[in-house]
Amino acid sequence: MEFTNHLQPTEEEPDEEAAGQRRRLPRLGLTSRILLALVLGLAVGVVFHYLVPAGPVRDEVFVGGIFYLLGQGFIRLMQMLVVPLVFCSIVCGAAAIDTKTLGSVGLKTLGLYLLTTAVAITLALGVGNLINPGEGVDMSSLGATAASDAAPLDEAAGTNVADTLLSIIPKNPIASLANGDMLPLIFFALFTGIVLARLGRRVETVHSFFVQFNDIMMEMTSLVMKVAPLGVFCLLARTFANVGFEAFLPMLKYMGGVLLALGLQLCVTYMVLLWLFARMSPLMFLRKFFSVAAFGFSTATSNATIPLNIETLEKKMGVDRRISSFTIPLGATINMDGTAIMQGVAVVFTAQLFGVPLGPVEYATVIATATLASIGTAGVPSVGLITLSMVFNAVGLPLEGIALIMGIDRILDMCRTAVNITGDAVVTSIVAKQAGRVDMRVFRDPDAGREVDDVRLAVHQ
Ligand code: ASP
């Protein structure tokens, strides 16, 4: 799914002169529109803050009226998608796992996917606390969209570890869905998907219902993203109208924090794992994987890189396709380390901006929820932002934090997608190597599989 595709005008312009003028106007894709909205929102907000005198027109009509209404409307649209999107995505992901394949290779892959995601989010929380992106600015006056509206983990969460763990099993899954209790919801979705896979043909109708509902949610996401520029403009205009330039530095620091944590995950975590568990040269791996990462970067869509990833692993690195054809699609669906990193830094950023204290229980909750959110994040652009609200809800953070993040998210989305798919390839290489299914002569040959770069692979979206 590429959001920009939906933005092309459809009807023909009958008037030739007007058509000519139209052709001369640059056609902006969604990314450019969001960036433009970011700059305009920032500029309008700053003008309102410093140049427009306070009064009912500024404060009630614009800042507290139009900007608030449209900005919050956009946030609510995103919130609306979370529960059905995560539920369907997990049911479909779990149902796609072939129970026969889920032998030791499957379990090891799942274990490594979860481990790398947990490391990623811990790294992100560490970097966040080191950089302190949201410190020094008080945004609590902005009036938080109470994350407390949404139920936190459970009433029992935070009392003790046993109760927190128990609260993952829903007493009533329908109530968990209705309340948006994410962990029980994910548990139930995984269970449903696994049982769907076990029953196979007998439940074909229900299976295709979930697959189709998943498609519907993807399309809804793409439609909601069409109004993202307006939402971003209003959210930023309101933020900057209230706090002026003070809000600018935190945004840059947040971006730097995410990029730093992504870089560490890519160059340290993955490469150490690759060397330790597979004895494969990190440099050779990076060199051969570069084109796949670049493809992921430019499309911001993990799903689209599946064919190229499998092909590259096989032809350039000697990884047996029988392993990668299972682990790569699975990873593109459930293993989103880069997304988890963005979410970790975003949590620290927002908590500091709004003065919400986070203790060890909250950090543990963030690690668990972001790991699960990564499972529920579909491999298409921007979904990480939507599942971010579920992480915020789990620790009671205000959703306004997403406003600042959203404006610069597309570029970070591109970077985190490159990391997401590198994680899938690293885990696949480790699992394949340990199963004796990597041809090391191919891996060591610098020229192996050159033709892969020339092949134009179909983009699955
Ligand atoms: N764009 C990411 C991916 O495809 C998902 C996200 O974080 O929004 O992997």
Image (cartoon, rainbow, N blue to C red):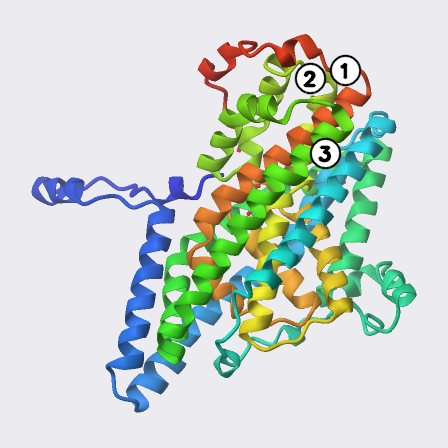
Of labels 3 and 1, earlier in sequence is 3
Callout 1 amino acid? Arg
- Determine whether label 3 and label 2 are within 8 Å by CB: no
Residue 260 as seen in the image, left or right of residue 68? right
- Give the camera-side residue of 249 and 332: 249
Can you name the residue that lies furthest to the bottom here? 55
Residue 324 as seen in the image, left or right of residue 69? right
Circle 1 residue: 437
What residue is drawn where x is 29% and y is 63%? 40
Callout 2 amino acid? Val
- Determine whether label 2 and label 1 are within 8 Å by CB: yes
What residue is drawn where x is 51% and y is 27%? 290
Secondary structure under badge 1? loop
Crowd band around label 2 with a 10 angstrom C-alpha radius: few (<14), some (14–19), many (20+): many
Callout 3 amino acid? Leu
Of labels 2 and 1, earlier in sequence is 2
What residue is drawn where x is 30% and y is 91%? 55
Q: Quadrant of residue 39?
A: bottom left
**Res 301 label:** none
Crowd band around label 3 with a 10 angstrom C-alpha radius: few (<14), some (14–19), many (20+): some
- Estimate the x, y position of residue 10 in percent, counting from the top left: 30, 41
Q: Quadrant of residue 61?
A: bottom left
Quarter for ligand 1?
Answer: top right
Q: Nearer the viewer, mark 3 or mark 1?
A: 3
- Estimate the x, y position of residue 316 in percent, counting from the top left: 59, 14
Image height of 414 relative to 361, above or below = above
Circle 3 residue: 273
- Determine whether label 3 and label 1 are within 8 Å by CB: no
Image height of 274 relative to 15, above or below = above
Distance Cα–Cα, label 2 vs label 1:
6 Å
Circle 2 residue: 319
